[in-house]
Image: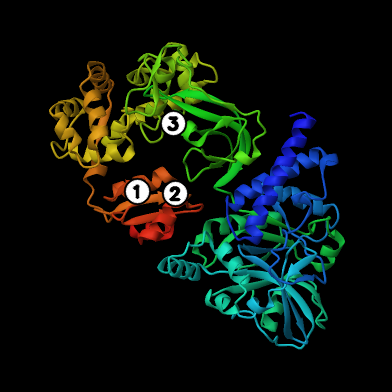
Amino acid sequence: MNKEEVKTRIEKLKEKINNLNYKYFVLNETEVSESVRDSLKKELIELEQEYPDLITPDSPTQRVGSVLSGKFAKVRHTTPKKSLADVFSEEEIHDWEERIDKIVPDKKEFVCELKIDGLNITILYEKGKFIRALTRGNGIEGEDVTHAVKTIESVPLQLNEEIDIEVSGEVYLPKKEFERMNEYQKKNGLEPFANPRNAAAGAVRQLDPKVTAHRGLSMFFYHVDKTNLSDKIKTQEEILEKFKQLGLPVCDYYEKVKSIDEVIKFCEKWAKKRESLGFEIDGIVIKVNDFEAQGRLGYTAKAPRYAVAYKFPAAQVSSRILDIILQVGRTGAITPVAVMTPTLVAGSTVSRATLHNEDEINKKDIRIGDTVIIQKAGDVIPEVVSVIKDLRNGNEKPFHFPKKCPVCGSDIERKEGQSAYRCTNENCYAVEKERLIHFVSKKAFNIDGLGERVVEQMIDEGLVQKSSDIFLLKKENLMGMEFFKDKKADNLIRGIEKSKKIELDKFLFALGIRYLGEQGSYDFAKYIIRKKEIFSILDLLEIVKSFSLEEMKNIEGVGEKIGDELYEWLNNEKNEKLLEDLYRVGVILEISNLTSTGKLKGKSFVLTGTLEGLGRDEAKDLIKKNGGTVHSSVSQNTDFVLAGESAGEKYNKAKKLGVKIIDEATFREMI
């Protein structure tokens, strides 16, 4: 972007963020997730750092909190309130350490505290007596919400010592109270609250304190603004302990650590354990422990230098679409993909997101140049959720599907009733390549060392044309390829030989039959072995060719759409020849995992989020080997939802339906 375009972008971002802040802080409304708001703000900060002359006093990066709602009396804070600078990665935590190390290299202790997702409140006590409670407001003035905060049972009206002290903390709504409140809302025909933070903020801003009292709010304290304490408090750890002595509730999960590496371990631990808490957290607050060092570090115009807020990896963030390209898959399906500005989402940097198909692009009105919300959950490829149309500048370009395959130039077609365009050339280079990549992938034959680049090179050099050719490769074939030396060639040949023994369901999945996923392959394999328990690929051919189309469609877990594709694929001469070739090169089918009478027999599972010690594929395999089944969506018939970190909508749906949610430790006990 040139400077004029940057100026326009900054103005658009300022307007949008200010609007979101007003809705979030004043109206207690959530138009987008907080992580999306954070990513828009991060983009604004980066642009302003690059062009400091474009920074204006009204920029949301130059202030704390938001405008006041006007409902309550405005009161000037005795000490201005600062907000913490956010960090989003391990690298940014290390960068912060480097900055403080230049000023206080001798003070290396840190205190890590859970970042409660609630509403910041400052309370003034005089001679130990509760006097006044203020919201953070704009950092200079706050709203007087004394009448509401006094109703919170965890907030003491009289301290255990008769001192003057001003303290800050977070008013929050426990998860159980949030669920109770939303049940109440539903019963009374009212709109349920979007999240506990909004519900807490709305409760504090009630004019009637009886309404606030009914909401079941609680509060944790974590900061002292000013005090006449006689104790010689020297550290953040000591002030938290003092708060307890005074009767001020503190979140007990804080920890003093002696290095940034320990800080990062603490952050990682709570990113995985956050779902186990009875309240919502959205990150970790990291502070230099020593108060004298804090004083030396001081403040920027907006934030303290001695502390930062690490935000957990977000499942949703904003990004900009730079281009839309087309990818050709193993079934010939042509998928539009957004090429975006590199963005950190769910713990990894992504620069591409699926747009699914033409209908999806038109439905969401996605254009090249748009600012969009993207999301990523678990191992799922990122997708575009929606467009932030307020940030359009008029230069965005609609995308139109071409008439020809972007790889081989053949015609593409979209059959009636289908959402995808497909290449009409069965021998399209991209289709053959994707079929082979799928065939050797981890969920299929799992041949280590046969990645996309190697497969592509093998096709280009004429070593492999179809999947059975892989099992005919010799060491001398590999030695002529780029990057292949003795050891690597030996390892790949051993890997290919080892992969010849494969479970029937993985074999079916490896064939790349349209619509036939992992669970469908498993269900189909279970049905097949009822006919014959010990068999070869030739026996498999004989069995499946005996199925009528009607029988195929009625197999539990297969259904009409998959049944149609299975029947067509298995009754195609070219595919029959492929199966015969795979038999001749020595591929052996195994069925031990399909005959399990394990502890999970008859139980259905849905996985969501990232597990600590198990990969998603590994967890699926364990469920199947122990007799269970894995499904992609939650329903009343689901027995268990196995939830890890960054669990998404499946977790929420399970709670709504009353489906039992288990963590990894419970799952391991079950098997």
SS assignment at label 3? helix
- Earlier in the chain: of badge 2 and badge 1, it is 2
Residue drawn at x 43%, y 69% as measured from the top left: 188
Residue drawn at x 75%, y 65% as measured from the top left: 289
Q: On the image, which quarter does residue 55 sit in?
A: top right
Amino acid type of the residue tagged 2 in the rendering: Leu
Q: Is residue 346 visible?
A: no
| Other-residue count near label 3 (Cα within 10 Å), few / some / many at <14 / 14–19 / ≥20 | few
Single out the mark in the foreground, 3 or 2. 3
Q: On the image, which quarter does residue 359 sit in?
A: top left
SS assignment at label 1? helix
Q: Identify the image quadrant of the N terminus.
A: top right
| Other-residue count near label 1 (Cα within 10 Å), few / some / many at <14 / 14–19 / ≥20 | some
The numbered dot on residue 614 is 2
Relative to residue 434, is residue 593 drawn left or right? left
In depth, the one of 179 and 484 nearer the eye is 179
The numbered dot on residue 622 is 1
Single out the mark in the foreground, 3 or 1. 3
